[in-house]
Amino acid sequence: MKTTKSESIYRLNCFVENKPGVLARIVGLISGRGYNIQTLNVGPTEDGTVSRMRIDVLATDRVVNQIILQLRNQVNVIEVTSRRQ
Amino acid sequence: MKPSKAVRNGARALVESLERAGVDTVFGYPGGNVLDVFDCLRDSRLRFILNRHEQGAVHCADGYSRATGRPGVVLVTSGPGLTNTITGLGCANMDGVPLVVICGQVELNRIGTDAFQEADTTGLTRAVSKHNFLIKNADEIPETVAQAFYIATHGKPGPVVIDLPCDVQRAATSATYPERISLRAYHPECAASARDVATLAKWLNAAKRPVIYAGGGVIAADAARDLTAMAEKANIPVVTTLMGIGSFDTAHPLAMGMAGIYGTAAAKTALEKADFILALGVRFNDRVTEGAKTSRGVKIVQVDCDPSAIDKNVVVTMGIVADIKDLLTVVASRVKTASHPDWLSVLEALKPIKPKYVPLHRGVIMPQSVIDAVAEATRGRCVLVTDVGQHQMFAARRFPHSRPRRFITSGGMGAMGFGIPAAIGAAIGGAEGPIVAIVGDGGAQMTAEELLLAARERLPIAFIVMNNGTLGMIRQMQKRYFIGDYSNPDFVLLAKAYGLASARVSDPEKLGAAVAKAVRAKKPYLLEVVVDGEATV
């Protein structure tokens, strides 16, 4: 993966309400800012009303922070954490 | 949700829920997939305002909300009804205006089949709304309506869309409106930590050249008085954004006017030379920062109820996620009185806020003088609604703005066509008049159909069309004449066709009397002012 100096892959771990349209909303929020999703995993958790998403994006730390804050603003997003890969 | 014996259809449950949510007025336009709701509206307490276009309906609800502080409500049909709302939604979303927009949808089992008048409502509105819902079961209606109003009005306000299929409108339900709203993942309540408050007070007290930079968030938080009290206590000059106009009286000695590319010299210098900026409810929009991303060594404290606004465009020294009113109340007691005489005298020298202009051609009205005539005729006491373009900037800069929610304009989206319907919405919301809508000849034609509504409802609005025969702002940006086949209808005849009284003025000598007549008419009145097409902001 070709990266610029300040960009790295960040893995976002999101716990979201398991409702229709939530995946589209989250993917749209990231792609709408012009960032490419490298990897996307969605699956159930032990709690059937909650889904877990793992999203890898290539971005700068500043952009990732903005994405996290905007994800947390979403009505269906319960929790977001991130880790630089 | 408590079960109840009262079984009714989904449409009735929706209308009941709107009544429970405290709604008094619904703007909109009917259509095939929302007829059940319209049928229930007839015997409800809700006042329905029939617009002539769905974009007009959303701008009307937007103007209603900006003028009153209450959420605006819109009801439209599926497909084209919904797609026509997109510009209005985007406008409200950018400026943080709380709306609840309900639209009909095709039957549940036809969604995704390219049915007649079907559109992917949740998909289309996702990027221009704060949140949206598709209701699949009539039992969800009351709770969804309650949640929609909660989301629209809490945190950073914004529009929420509810998509309601027509068979769900007809399905029976006994669900009732919830007493309490519970959202699992959305908790926008926020408060500043004691440490942040202490740091803010310390920096403010130590600052030699402090400035308060106030945005629309101050008005949304109902914190204009608190802002004034804080500024006065420590003699801090105040700069506002376009959306922050009204949060601080422009006649106040500490008022430095509007920031940004069309802003005042005093505001620019205040922001450039300050050693401390207290940014309240702003996002450091590119119109103000002109692309700057760092604070250039200035201490900046940014306060916003929306965590994602912090550091969004400019990296600040400290961000505080808090209700602006609450924060100002807490900080005010810790701020020491100060006078900053040297700093204020530097800025004072850059006033006046009202820029001078030189008439370009003899006998031709300058657009600036139209704003001055409105200020004089109303003694500055009117709700001033604008459209988008040169006239908007003249109105922002020259008018004596003294109170919040009295200057209504499309800021972030800059949506031409906003002015006429937003003024109508403000009037329907009961805004204390007179109400003056200043629009350009370009924007006037984008939503001119709503003039009919003003006439039918006999709304006391003076529509002033500043006709320069060109898209002035665009021409100005192109820095050359906009030569083409741009032409206008006869606005005086157009207004007459819609049932408004109307007149035209082109003589500078007669401008004052013509404007005074329009704003004192106490009825819908359109005044076309032929202004100099070569004037620039």
Image: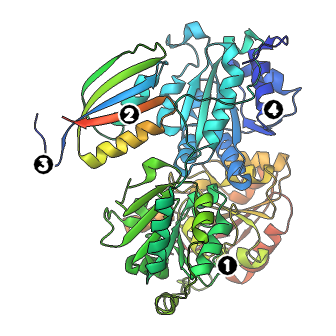
Residue at mark 1: chain: B
Residue at mark 4: chain: B
Residues at discs 2 and 3 in contact (Cβ within 8 Å)? no
Asked whether A56 or B16 is in front, the reply is A56
Q: Amino acid at mark 3?
A: Lys
**Is residue B315 shown above or below B334?**
above
The circle drawn on residue B372 is 1
Residue at mark 3: chain: A
Residues at discs 1 and 3 in contact (Cβ within 8 Å)? no
Residue B304 vs residue B232: left or right?
Answer: left
Q: Nearer the viewer, mark 2 or mark 1?
A: 2
Residue B131 is drawn in which quadrant? top right
Secondary structure of the residue carrying tag 3 is loop
**What is the CA distance from the residue labelled 2 to the residue labelled 4?**
36 Å
Residues at discs 3 and 4 in contact (Cβ within 8 Å)? no
Q: Residue at x 25, y 46 (%)?
A: A61
Q: Nearer the viewer, mark 1 or mark 4?
A: 4
Secondary structure of the residue carrying tag 4 is helix
Relative image position of residue B12 (x, y in whole percent): 80, 20
Q: Amino acid at mark 4?
A: Glu
| 10 Å crowding of disc 2: few (<14), some (14-19), many (20+) | some
**What is the CA distance from the residue labelled 2 to the residue labelled 3?**
25 Å
**Is residue B146 shown above or below B140?**
below
Secondary structure of the residue carrying tag 2 is strand
Residue assigned mark 3: A5
Q: Nearer the viewer, mark 2 or mark 3?
A: 2
Asked whether B497 or B462 is in front, the reply is B462
Q: Amino acid at mark 1?
A: Asp
